[in-house]
Amino acid sequence: MKYIVRRLGLFLITLLAALTFNFFLPRLMPGNPAIDMLSRLESKGHLGPQALHTIEIALGLNKHTSLLHQYVQYLGNAATGNFGISYTFFPAPVSKEILEALPWTLGLVGMTTVIAFLLGTFIGLISAWFRGGRLDSALPPLFVILSGFPYFWFALLCILLFGVTLNWLPVSGGYNTSLLPDWDWTFVGSVLSHSVLPALTIVLTSIGGWTLTMRNNTVTVVAEDYVRMARAKGIPEWKIMWHYAGRNAMLPNLTGFGIQLGFVVSGAVLVEYVFNYPGLGWMLLDAVSNQDYPLMQALFLMITVAVLVAVFAIDLLTAVLDPRTRDSG
Amino acid sequence: MVAGEAALGEAVGADLEVAGRLRGRGARRGMARMLLGNGKAVVGACLLGVFCVLAIIPGVIAPDNPNAEVFKPALPPSLAHLLGTTAYGQDVFSQLIWGARASLIVAFAAGAAATAISVVIGVSAAYLGGLWDGALSLVTDVLLVVPAFPLIVVIAAYTNGANLLMLIVVLVVTGWSFSARQLRSQMLSLKRREFLEAAKSRGERRSYIVIFEALPTMTSLVIACFLSSALYAVLAAAGLQFVGLGDPSSLSWGTMLYWAQNSSALNTGMVLWAVMPGVCVAMLGASFALLNYAFDEIGNPALRPVRIARARGRRRG
Amino acid sequence: MDDRRVLTVSGLSVDYLTGSGPVRAVDSVDLELEAGEFLGIVGESGSGKSTLLYAIAQLLTPPAEIAAGSVEFLGRDLVQLTRAQLRHSRWRDFSVVMQSAMNALNPVMTLEAQMRDTCEAHTEMRSEEIHARSVEVMRLVGVDPIHLRSYPHQLSGGMRQRAMIAMALLFTPQLVIMDEPTSSLDVVAQRSLMIQVKRLQERLGFAVIFVTHDMSLVGGIADRLAVMYAGKLVEVGPTRDLFSRPLHPYTRGLLEAFPSIQAVRQRLIGIPGSPPDLARLGAGCRFATRCTDAIEVCAATDPPAENIDGRTVRCLRVKGWLGHAEQ
């Protein structure tokens, strides 16, 4: 399975690159913001020696050991989830905060991205199959224009329309904060109603991209000989659309999904910010405004890992769907 | 994965045989004509043109200093203030017109630089092959997967906000990889075409072959890449400025949105201030997106709008 | 109508709808085919031969469309049939073998799955029957049936082409249309495939229309040849006659370009110039600009198709050369 091994290799190398980036960045910054950070942190309360050590390694404050030694220690810390103490949520450790925000992001961003992808792929296929039809004439220009919209502005519009003007849906937070988190209908309902607008924003702004690429792929595939051949054999049209055109056109789209995931997540960060949705993205921007470096670095890492895992999952899926990848690599 | 992309690249060449025979000579003339005939291209180009004019001569339309906080704050739209005033007493309309400049500079500079890098890396990787291809592709893939916005946020946070130059640099570094990939796959499929082999057997140097033989055929793809890089730059820059990481003291649409958000403009009735800069970003983005799509259609003949034949009792698709 | 006549093409014309108006890629083609006959259509790239083929098989896609003419196959005009009626006839009565099996086979389905799709589309065969038939046709073309479980990219070029031919014979149709099926193979594989096709044809009795740019490939196998140039058929007749005594200057040029291994060594004479731009045709004979025998009237008058000596030729000078009286 050369292909899988290669993709796994890419996963690990990218992860290492992100970690290395995190390691070197504070050491390269002029004016040494890290020392600043440390004193601010200490002014908040007592830091245990272990926490202090972790932060020193992460921010480049430890001048006693060699760079290589620090690097190895940093990697070790990262592997065990030890990222130090958060300034914003003092004295909670960074890892705890991240784990609390993670499910919100996974739920919102994870699900909406998948929905947008599936829906977009389906619409793109249908639209290209009935070329020249009304769907095909109306959709591409519409989605092209939509793909030029900034995510966060769209979020603002939603807030304006549905929140402020119509007051149909809540526009802030992940749930009604007067409720206690619990597995009952009130809480779950609140979570759901708070997720409608953010989800809608993400789906509407990202669906355009999938639809367009799928449409273009399908158009190209339909011009291929094997579709013509299938027609020549008298195979029913719907079968050709699904099994001959669809399954082949989807493959580059799936690859594109992996590539675009980075962009989608980037947009989702802003959406969380605008809606005060308590996910990783919102926490990241919050950390930035507080100059909470340990938290910031760890969040960046977490987001990157999430994207990498998703991309790898897609690679596995591609191997299942495309027999050619299994044999090449 | 590679197979799917290569197939797409191949398909581009597939139609050229027939199309070439039927279209006759003058590919360059053909492109200009195709652009004019393409509705999306025309709309996109017009929009872009309008914004360019605004960026070059903003004083003609809005002569006053946009940053001057001389007016009464939070005024509703009127003849004197077409879009009302901000919470700090600035004319929103003025700000909007003058803000075009920063956004366009970022779009063109970052777009051009990112495209240049992606052409060099993408084409070289494909043409050189072997270890070079492996190494360059690895770098491209790594940069591609890492989520750009969080990366930019972290960098900007450490440098305490970014000025325009820093912003452009960061956008270029995170934005070139997408186009590099596409250019590489196109170059890979071109590599097998005969005219390149012919040049090689004539004894031409590799760099000559790449620059003078291969690149001209990829013109529409390069332009499409530029447009998508510019689009990315516009949206990413707006996002960064919106969260306050892009030099809030400068004037651009993104920073307008930042200040509007800070003053809770949506909730306090200054709706136009909060929304209009976004409209401009969206329109600029849309113009790039439309032009990009138009160039996609030009590059791949199969994507062009299909004329449904109406004569002779059509019943075949 | 002749009982053994399988196909009659009359005045078939195909237009490509381009931005600057329709371009006629195939112009008033007339063809006849008897049962079990092997007809070769020869022409250079861009002559319109593949377009003609797809037009006959009703497989044209926009921007190409049939502008005029009829294709009478087994008593029905295919051009006039509805999609549903046509679908019923497809593969059962006529099948197609395309140029590149790599492109003509669905890359994500096994060979057997693709054969099954075809069978299920037309019959009520049970899956064991389908499997048995698939094995049978694979054996017919000399490919080990174990490869039914393979994906197209796992087979060699020659095996893929044979698998395509096997698929074409699933319902033992009356007519098999082949579009340069050997051009992606090396010379040895080419020869072997051609022999196989001929053997199958003799055994199963189907008619073949074989399109190629290589005259020598079909020289020993085709019963009749049709030479195509710039969208028109310039000469049609029995293969042996064409080879021994070509009438049209273009046919002559083609033959002179292929040396014979057995004959005396001679200079290779190519045909200077290149085919005309179909979008900008003059009034006269399309071959006039490259023809060494062209005279003044050739550039002004488009030669009509004339029946001479058991052949159909489009050339104003042929009658003069043969000394025939005006008819």
Image (spheres, coloured by chain):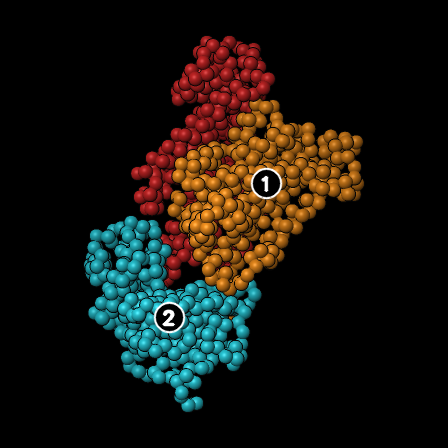
Q: Which mark is residue C256?
A: 2
What element does badge 2 sit on?
helix
Give the colour chain A carries in the figure: red
Tell me which amino acid carries mark 2. Answer: Glu
Badge 2 and badge 1 both on one subunit: no
Q: Which mark is residue C257?
A: none
Query: Which quarter of the figure is the N terminus of chain B placed in?
Result: top left
What element does badge 1 sit on?
helix
Residue B84, given in percent of the width and then of the height, sits at 74, 38
Residue C18, placed above or below residue B187: below
Q: Residues within 10 Å of mark 2 (few under 14, many from 20)?
A: some
Chain letter, disc 1 residue: B
Q: Residue at x 63, y 50 (%)?
A: B45
Chain letter, disc 2 residue: C
Query: Which quarter of the figure is the C terminus of chain B placed in?
Result: bottom left
- The residue wearing badge 1 is B112
> Which one of the lettered chains is coloured orange?
B
Tell me which amino acid carries mark 1. Answer: Ala
Q: Is residue B80 visible?
A: yes
Q: Is residue A169 visible?
A: no
- On the picture, is B165 further left or further right than B198? right
Give the colour chain C carries in the figure: cyan
